[in-house]
């Protein structure tokens, strides 16, 4: 994929996320109004709808960073990243720990978020994703009760071989490999018995 095609794909991702986040926000506001007027049905029903709405909102904002267009000079604060990861995971099966305290460029944040999506696919029973940085080397370590990476998906990272057919559910692997190459950021992945380690930089 050429750099022009990659930018176009990222712009499409940004546009879709931008257009979807507004109506989801409106739905959330409507639910709050219903809860105030006691017209929203039982609390269990309202809670389920509100949780789904919050989850969708967090996921779209996460996707906007992971698959959207990263402009030059854009940064994200550590607080913003932690909040987004916390909202994304919610009470789910994967817990994420972001150690670095400094701001991070939107370009690097995009790569790390793509790494998270790759790790998520290999943790069917949940687990932990630990993100650290030292001397401009980022490490994303995934551990869990059962680490189950599919070789055909991880070949784009481990063997630097792009699969001929990429399933939509696993597009993060191909996109991560392409974006890292275009950013001139070295990318390595190691699959061990009890963990996966991805290095950037």
Image (tube, helix red, strand yellow):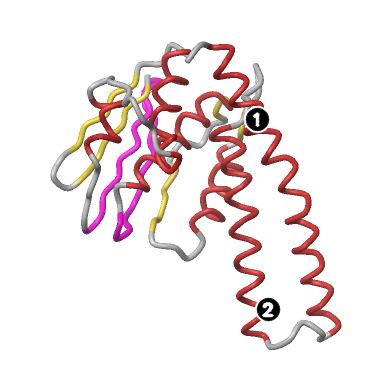
Taken as a whole, is the magenta stretch helix, strand or loop?
Answer: strand
Residue 16 lies in quadrant: top right
Spatial separation of the CA atoms under disc 2 and disc 1: 33 Å
The residue lying furthest to the left in this view is 193
The residue sitting at 77% across, 82% down in the picture is 40
- Between 67 and 75, the one lying in front of the other is 67
Q: Are marks 2 and 1 in contact (CB under 8 Å)?
A: no
Verify whether residue 128 appears in magenta: yes
Seen from the viewer's position, the closer of residues 32 and 154 is 154
Q: Is residue 62 above or below residue 190?
A: below
Q: Which residue is mark 1?
A: 12
Q: Quadrant of residue 157?
A: top left
Circle nearer the N terminus (2, 1): 1
Residue 46 tag number: 2
Mark 2 or 1: the one toward you:
1
Residue at figure coordinates x 36%, y 26% from the top left = 134
């Amino acid at each position: 994929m050429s750099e022009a095609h990659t930018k176009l794909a990222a712009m499409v991702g940004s546009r879709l996320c931008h257009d979807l986040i507004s109506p989801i926000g409106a739905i959330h506001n409507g639910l709050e109004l219903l809860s105030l007027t006691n017209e929203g049905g039982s609390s269990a029903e309202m809670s389920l709808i509100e949780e789904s709405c919050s989850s969708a909102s967090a996921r779209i904002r996460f996707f906007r960073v992971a698959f959207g267009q990263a402009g030059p000079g854009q940064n994200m604060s550590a607080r913003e990243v932690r909040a987004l990861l916390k909202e994304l995971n919610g009470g789910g099966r994967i817990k994420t720990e972001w150690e670095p305290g400094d701001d991070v460029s939107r370009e690097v944040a995009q790569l790390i978020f793509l790494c998270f999506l790759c790790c998520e696919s290999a943790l069917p029973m949940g687990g932990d994703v630990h993100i650290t940085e030292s001397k401009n080397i980022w490490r994303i370590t995934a551990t869990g009760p059962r680490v189950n990476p599919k070789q055909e998906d991880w070949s784009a990272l481990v063997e630097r071989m792009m699969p001929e057919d990429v399933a939509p559910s696993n597009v993060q692997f191909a996109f991560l490999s392409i974006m890292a190459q275009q950013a001139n950021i070295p990318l390595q992945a190691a699959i061990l018995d009890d963990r996966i380690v991805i290095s950037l930089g």
